[in-house]
Image (tube, grey):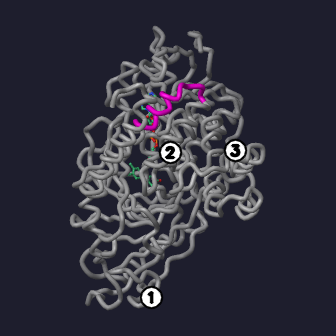
Amino acid sequence: MSGDGAGDFDVAIIGGGVNGTGVARDAAQRGLRVVLFEKNDIAFGASGNSSGMIHGGPRYLTDDPEVTRTSCEDSGHIQRIAPHLLFRVPFLMPLGPEGTEQTHIDLVDAFFEAYDRYQPLKNGKPHARLTADELYELEPGLFGGRGATPARLAGGITFDEWGIDGVRLCIANAVDAIERGAIVHTHTGVEAILRDESGRARGVRARNFSTGARVEVGARAIVNATGAWTGITARAARLPPESARVRPGKGIHVVFDRRITNYAIIAKAIDDRQIFLEPWQNVTVLGTTDEDFYGDPDDVRATSDEVRYLVEAISNVFPGVAGARAIGTTAGVRPTLYAYGPNEDALSRDHRVVDHANDGARGLFSMIGGKLASYRIFAEQMTDLLMVYLDAARVPCRTHTLALPGGERAVSRKVLAEGLGIDAVAATRLTYRHGGRAERIAERIRERPHEANVVCACEPVLEAEVRHVVRHEMAASVDDVARRTRLGLGACGGMRCAARCGQIVAEERGLEPRQGARLALSFLARQAKTRAVACGSLQAQEEALLLASIRSELGPLLGEDV
Ligand SMILES: Cc1cc2nc3c(=O)[nH]c(=O)nc-3n(C[C@H](O)[C@H](O)[C@H](O)COP(=O)(O)OP(=O)(O)OC[C@H]3O[C@@H](n4cnc5c(N)ncnc54)[C@H](O)[C@@H]3O)c2cc1C
């Protein structure tokens, strides 16, 4: 890529999370010439490590009802444009003894009556008030079973939310942007935001971390969509960090190997914070923490303390968790709107665009705050501002009606399974992740039947899907494939599939087999770190031994004396 004239692109977007990819899609759809830079991989940050809820956030209803309304409204739109990615998550909120909500059931009931008014916006069902017996009927493992009913259990409330795979949402936005003419560079970090003598933004300088090559592009407008990195990015424009300030809040999740409950369950942690246990895709997720974060957002990981805090809290309400198999953790940093004073939980989840014209940098904008659940409207507001700034012809936003890739039409998993002779679970996962575009992967298998081979048995992921995400979704490493397909994120932690996946990635990218082996080993090493804090010391030791034996097996391929 070349060019130093300000006219190369209309807009350069920095950051490939949900907000950056959302703006790339909207701006490309409205006819702007778009380039996006992501220093890691698409959805590497908060967007790929969230709790995966496209919800209204009843929690925000008392202090920030506008956030609840916006999220519910956008949730309705996201359901329409990506129906394959959304799944219903009904919640149970037990009320009464320690570890549960202590508020009087009548008050909670009344609160959810207010929340019900927002439910139609997101196709949610109204809440229901439950007796203790009804709670046990729905979730027999609550409090260790009916016989162990705590004396003061008053009953509970159930309410309705929606789950999503945040990574797939970002990928769908990025792929759509590319198909509408945008250029997306992953593993390429912006090092400097270039400004002319008057201070106006005129382009960016970036470095590709795989090749080391530096590139410079001209752009008439620049969008800083770097989430928790926002302040660091502002410095790349020679602006003071306080010109685009977020209050970064670290959140972690513990992942269990399968669905261990029928419903998502709300509980209270020792410090009165609300936490949840949620069946999510084919695993269970326990989350989340929310703590001010002063570390490096490129290297954020769960600690064993954080894991214990969550497990202890949920054990009060669902003791069976102690016997369940934890297989990993995720961690991300929320780019929350800045405020000095309030506790992390009490911070607004609203979003805001900062126009740096006020700091002398015309044409530079920062997107701050927000939620996965309201990314689309945030992207629309940002693109509206770009259209005005660029004096572009007024093309209306259509991201609420235009389907995302895969959302255009449904593909029957039964027809797919029977037609290709693949496992029903594999067909189900394929249609979940790719919607109508699962047909493109099926087409590969029809032409090359051996690509129906299962590479990752835990998820499961087929060879054709791995090849598809490398070719059409910018996956450049085993980590990237895992992010897009969940390969290697199941019970075995990639021990059985990373090496094969590395080979396929190497073949697709024209790399040496040795480089494929390296990609596999670096994925396994990273996985081991995120798993060790959750899976207990014995299993961590066993996995370390297994990793050492895989390394020695691959040694000759790597050209190493192991
Ligand atoms: C634990 C947790 C749980 C959450 N749960 C939910 C939920 O259930 N529902 C919900 O609606 N919201 C949830 N959120 C909030 C939501 O995830 C975030 O608000 C949203 O993902 C932010 O998106 P973003 O694009 O602004 O930031 P990010 O997704 O963090 O993306 C920023 C990107 O910028 C890149 N970048 C940084 N610097 C540079 C550079 N110099 N050059 C190029 N690229 C760069 C990073 O690599 C990163 O990929 C949660 C957040 C967390 C942390």
Query: Which amino acid lies under the numbered mark 3 shown in the image of this protein?
Result: Arg
- Foreground pick, 204 / 253: 253
Which residue is pictured at 46% across the width and 15% down the height?
Answer: 194
Question: Of discs 2 and 1, which sits in the foreground?
Answer: 2
Query: Along the polypeptide, which appears first: circle 1 or circle 3?
Result: 1
Some atom of ligand 1 lies within 8 Å of the CB belonging to the residue at label 2: no
Using residue 412 as the reference point, say whether residue 350 is left or right of it. Answer: left
- Foreground pick, 534 / 297: 534
Query: Along the polypeptide, which appears first: circle 2 or circle 1?
Result: 1
**Are the residues flagged by discs 1 and 3 in contact, CB closer than 8 Å?**
no
Please, what secondary structure does the residue beneath circle 2 have?
Answer: helix
Q: Is residue 137 magenta?
A: no
Residue 134 is tagged as 1
Query: Along the polypeptide, which appears first: circle 3 or circle 2?
Result: 3
The span from disc 3 to disc 2 (Cα, nearest Å) is 31 Å
Quadrant of the snapshot with the N terminus: top right
Answer yes or no: is residue 384 visible: no
Please, what secondary structure does the residue beneath circle 3 have?
Answer: loop
Span colored in magenta: 509-522
Kindly identify which residue carries mark 3: 398
